[in-house]
Image (cartoon, grey):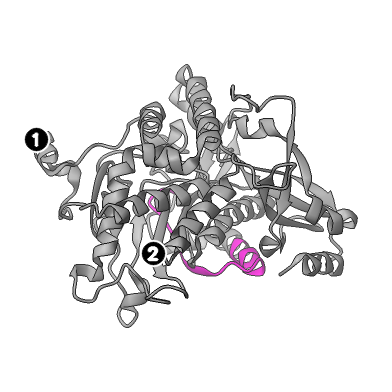
Amino acid sequence: MNAQDVVQQARNANLRLVRFLYCDNGGIIRGKATHASKLATRISEGIGQTLAMQAFTGVESLAAVAGMGPIGEFRLIPDPQTFVILPYVPNTGSMMCDMIRLDGQPWEACPRTFLKRMVARLAEQGMRAEAAVEHEFYLAREEGDKYVPADDSLCYSSRGLDEQAEVMDAILAALEAEGVSIELFHTELGPAQQELSIHYADALRAADNVCLVRETARGVARAFDLLATFAPKPFLDQAGSGAHIHLSLWGSETSEHPGKNLFYDANERGGLSQRGKHFIGGVLRHIRGLVAITCGSPNSYRRLLPHFWSSAYGAYGFDNREGAIRIPSIFWGREAESINLELKCADHSGNPYLSIGAFIAAGLDGIKNSIDPGEPQEIDPGNYSDEEREQRGIRRLPTSLDEALDELEHDQVLMEALGPLLASSYLAVKRNESAFFKEKTAEEETRQHFYKY
């Protein structure tokens, strides 16, 4: 779809507004909207936005970042390929945007541009990435001064499917109308907790889809007087919600293995190739800094606990749901197509463009340097003694956002991939958010995160 197609579709649908959206360093989806009558010019010239917005935090404060104050702006330039008509609000469409400098060049602080750079790195080596995310979220109601789950259904229960059948059918119908391909849906461990799996797409489109799913689920739920929250730990006494990233690498059309899943080797255990093992090795080497990006809020670290199936250790295994990386079992008849790696220590407080891009950057370092991930773990790593984990090189993931940010700041590979401006603004935003919640109670923290994601 090109710009002219978007303008024509907006006209045919009698749209009044088209939202120009982006996901910021705080993991919040923000944007501005143009009147449809101005869309033809706005698509190319964009909408102005202050540079300070990439220093804006998830607690509505401004972090101290050089050059991100009251002076200067960038342009929100939409990607026509992401245009959708939003079924849950009247006469409105949306597009995801890149942040472009006034000289027409991509702004170095743009998360979407960062992912594009990582995709380009893959292309230079004859590879491309496909990704998909498992979306876990709760449906809830506000009662007085607190949020409560919308029902008390059990994990995977058919009753749970019945309880929220109407709202979920409306969410799925809206996503289908927006062109999102749905794989699976089921109720999860917590009461009124849902899980929605989206079909894989190229890495950039997969990140766009993450934003679209969040926006759509929340928007549709609102029409049912419900809240859809994607917060990592919205209820202290219930299961947390993740955004597990599934990723595979494929030979590009110009490579020596065009169209081949480079993680597949029929002669290896689980079908996992040597290149796939090296990719895991890179991710595990950088995992403690990587979680500062994929688990981007103080609330995230209430979820990353041992024995909670959310991953708490830098380990991997075949269908091991306690490892940071799970190698899912492949499907009969489409083994070469279905092999992929699942990063479990990820949630919706992480910007999806940064999360998928950093996942790729860490894995590429493993391929470049042939990093051995060690032996796959056959048991829950939390069941080893401290001495046994040390012998196996298994480290606990950071237990706070501050600890993770310290690791990221000292990770040369991830910092270089992000670039100076994006790295410094991201760290400043997250340090600010962490400081804000230091004096808050656990209940205050969960409430504030509840409605942000």
Picture coordinates of residue 72 (x, y %)?
74, 31
Give the answer, above or below, for where 399 lies relative to 320. Answer: above
Q: How many marks?
A: 2
Amino acid type at mark 2: Ser
Q: Quarter of the image holding residue 75?
A: top right
Q: Nearer the viewer, residue 18 or 259?
A: 259
Residue of label 2: 248
Residue at the far top in the pictured view: 439
Picture coordinates of residue 434 (x, y %)?
47, 25
Circle 2 sits in a helix, a strand or a loop, which is it? strand
Asked if the stretch drawn in magenta spans residue 207, the answer is no
Residue at horizontal 37%, vertical 37%? Answer: 412
Residue at horizontal 62%, vertical 50%? Answer: 218
Q: Nearer the viewer, residue 355 or 149?
A: 355
Which labelled disc corresponds to residue 387? 1
Picture coordinates of residue 383 (x, y %)?
15, 43
Q: Which residues are magenta?
A: 171-193
Image quadrant where one finds the C terminus: top right
